[in-house]
Structures are given as structure tokens and as C-alpha cells.
Image (cartoon, rainbow, N blue to C red):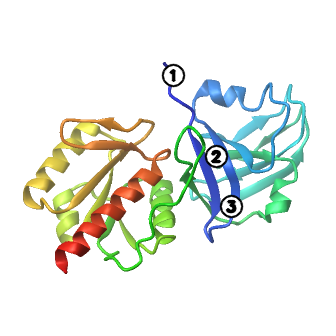
Amino acid sequence: MGRRRGTLTLRREDGRVVCETCTVADTTLRRLRGLLGRSGLRGGEGIVLRPAWSIHTAFMRFPIDVVFLDPDQTVIQIFPELRPWRTASIRGAREIVELAAGECHRRGLEVGDRVAWASVADERGDWAPPPNLHGTDVRGVVVVSRDRRFQKLVRFVLDRHGIEAEVATGQDLVEVIEQRDANVVVLDASESLLEAGRAVAAAKALHPRVEIIVVAENTAKTARPDFVVYDKWEETDGVVEQIASALGMVAFAEQ
């Protein structure tokens, strides 16, 4: 069985929504298919092609707005109402977002705007924000990742719930925990789940009360012998809920 296509919400850094339901096309077949065969896009719908810097609208039946994002999630070009049988490309783009024609104008999206992705929960498309953490200890969250896009996504989502997160690129978890006085660590294990498992075990042996949340690229949440792995792009809500729970426990323990 193939991996289910993920669905994301695209927001500006100020929280305003650009696209409520954006389908992820992150394989060669999905990128090639794109919007082919569709009769149109409704407002609030879209497709994100990743990685991608060039598209065509051959065989399509309707115009679309095309948004190019760089690796820092900044809008570097917009092609409004691109008609069928056209091409568009921007060297240096990392992702391309296809929206209903006129949507960029309606949403006020412009070149230079910075955006971020958030998960749209489950298969039914229901989405609700994680619990508000007002009144809890919201310090001591560290995101350990070399992926700048993921760093920005997590910090953006956490900031909306009053949680301040630091970023670390080093992979020595014990050192990160001790130097940053971490209560919660989000560990990006995309490079190696095996190495992540060893790092988690070593850190837990010395700091058993620290919550370590492991994420990885292109993987559904999978139970492992001693930890759970979240998909870093499609299960953002689950990660935030785990952080909320961990922070609540830390605050309770310190009262």
C-alpha cells in the first residue's frame, strides 16, 4: 500500500491563512500528476510540489496562481492566473504552491512574505489547534535539527501557543540538554533513526525526566522498542501535543 498523501495548511508568519487544505506532492509521480485531470480548485485548496523549481500547465483545463518558495519559506515569485499550456520556473526555489486563480490577490500574498506549514490533522480533514499552554512553564524547549525549514515550522507553530523554542544543530543530545537546560527536546532523526535511537538511550540514562520527541522525514508515526517517530511534516499537531503534555508535567512537578 502506498503512503497516504499528506495535507497541510499554509500560513503567513503572522498566522493568516494562505491555503487551508494543501495536498503534498512529494514523489516524482505525484509531482508529474499535479492537477492533471482536475476540473478546478476551490478557494482554500492547493497543491505543494516539493522539491520543485519548475512547472508546466500542459493538459490542464483552468488557470492557477503559482507561488515559488525558497528554502527559507519566503515567497520569491508569484505567477497569478497562469493559463493552461504555459511553463514557469525560478532557479533557487525549493517548493511550488499551486492555488486557485486569483487566490493570492484575495489573500494578500506578496513576494517577500514568509510562510510556514502546519499539519491538517487526520484523514477526515478535521483540524483543531493543540491545547493552549497559558499558565504552564513554556521554557526549555529545544529543536535539534539541521533542517532550517523544519526549525522555522516548529518555532512558528509553538510561538502561536506561547511556547518559546531554541534551535540547536549539534547532535550530542546530552550536551544539548545540559547546555540549554532543556525540559523537552524535539530531535530530527531524518539522517539516521539508528543513531537517533542510540542518542535517545544515552540521554535518557542521564536525564530521565527530559522528554525527547523524535521526528523524521517521510515516515508515518511508527512504534519502536523505546520511542515513537513522528512524520516531521505531516504530524506537527502530534508533536505539539506531546510538547504540551511534557511541559504540563514539568510545571506540575515543580510546584
Query: In what element is the residue under mark 1?
Result: loop
Residue 156 x %, y %? 51, 66
Give the Cα separation between the discs numbered 2 and 1. 22 Å
In the picture of the structure, the residue carrying the numbered disc 1 is: 2
Give the Cα separation between the discs numbered 3 and 1. 30 Å
Residue 137, compared with residue 1, is above or below; it is below
Which of label 2 and label 1 is nearer to you?
A: 1
Q: Residue at x 12, y 59 (%)?
A: 208
| Outermost left residue | 205
**Quadrant location, the C terminus:** bottom left
Query: In what element is the residue under mark 2?
Result: strand
In the picture of the structure, the residue carrying the numbered disc 3 is: 17
Q: Residue at x 13, y 54 (%)?
A: 204
In the picture of the structure, the residue carrying the numbered disc 2 is: 95
Quarter-wise, where is residue 182 in the image? bottom left
Amino acid type, label 1: Gly
157 or 238, which lies in front? 238
Badge 3 or badge 1: first in the primary sequence: 1
